[in-house]
Amino acid sequence: MKWWINLLLAIVIIVVIIPALTVQDFSLFGFKDKRSSSEMNGQPNDEIDITSKSKEGVDEPEIAMYDHATESVIRMPLEEYIIGVVAAEMPASFELEALKAQAVAARTFAVRKMRAFGGNGCSSHPQADVCSLYSHCQAWISDEQQKKNWGSDYAANHEKIVRAVEETRGYIMTYDGAPIEVFFHSTSNGKTEDAGEVFSHSLPYYTVVDSPGEETSPKYKQTFTFSNEQFVKIFKSRYPRSNLSAKNLSSQIRVKSYTKSGRVAELIVGGITVKGTDFRYLYGLNSTDFKFKFEGDRVIIETTGYGHGVGMSQVGANYMAQQGHTYVEILKHYYKGVEIEKYR
Ligand SMILES: [Zn+2]
């Protein structure tokens, strides 16, 4: 070959082929790039390394999940698991930064449970790190299920969630250097709840914080109607020694105290003191922020918010993202004093 043909080939390789490969690599990682220092305040401690997919593909820990849909243990790379969790736990229509906050919450939950990181695994399924039951560990859906749920929106929704997971790859919330105990909920009543009001113990990062924008949720206000007889029957199924009667029901029910966030702490029903949280589960209410209305032979309970109220409100997170907040700002708002850092 003539010398100038070799030179031409060399130029083509340097100018065209190498950059093309690099661009493809970038697109795999969701367009993350260096940020200006002014933006760093709302960003995690370290930049995500956008060039290390192959390295991480090898190093990435595997999670063992008990799948309730197929009643089997599935092993998969951690980040692949997070995609299925975000798809199951938050509407894909939510803002990207809200989905990223959800991805970090999901990863924190998983890392804390995983035996590879010293966790205890799922207490119901000892052969697994986590299970796919939302009320026990966290929900997870397969790729097939995502296709079924989303139909023609599958490609766009899936891509958005993959991007949320990729752009937070490896990041978790820590407190005193350890992954936090993760709680979140759908919709608050405008304030989050102190963990000690709902669970057996308080945690320093779960205090009461304002959570604006909740009114946009269809679950914000709901009513639950019971006949007086039904109401009494349900109560006596749990408290058989109660003297509650369907006559003059309104005079037998009184809220005794509220929590700092305005939810019912305790109420007295038919002479028995009941915790707001127990009352909520007994009647299947959306939240412990409830009010009674007595109308003749029926009682109407109006709830505000959906869920226990502890930690991040998903609707509140989406609202914050709409106001231009990053996922780090969202997480640091709902989880006080946490650091966002890569798991080790
Ligand atoms: Zn479980």
Image (cartoon, grey):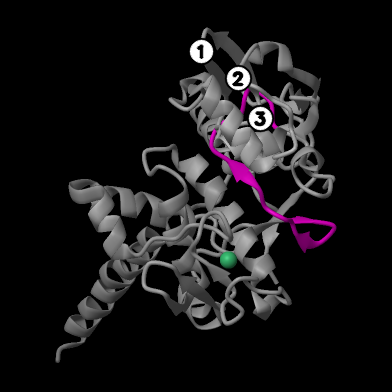
Residue at 35 percent across and 65 percent down: it is: 142
Residue located farthest toward the left when viewing the structure as drawn = 1
Residue 4's image quarter? bottom left
- Above or below residue 202? Residue 318 is above
Q: Position of residue 75 (x, y in %)?
A: 47, 80
Which residue corresponds to mark 1?
297
Under circle 1, the secondary element is loop
Under circle 2, the secondary element is loop
Is residue 342 within the magenta segment? no
| Mark 3 residue type | Thr
| Mark 2 residue type | Ala
Instruction: For marks 2 and 1, give the CA distance.
Output: 8 Å
Residue at 41 percent across and 74 percent down: it is: 71
Residue 31 visible: no
- Number of the label disc, if any, that sits on residue 246: 2
User: Residue 70 versus residue 89: which sits nearer the camera?
Assistant: 70
Which residue corresponds to mark 3?
288
Under circle 3, the secondary element is loop
Q: Is mark 2 within 8 Å of ligand 1?
A: no
Residue located farthest toward the bottom when viewing the structure as drawn = 1
- Quadrant of the snapshot with the C terminus: bottom right
Query: Which segment is the magenta one?
Result: 174-192
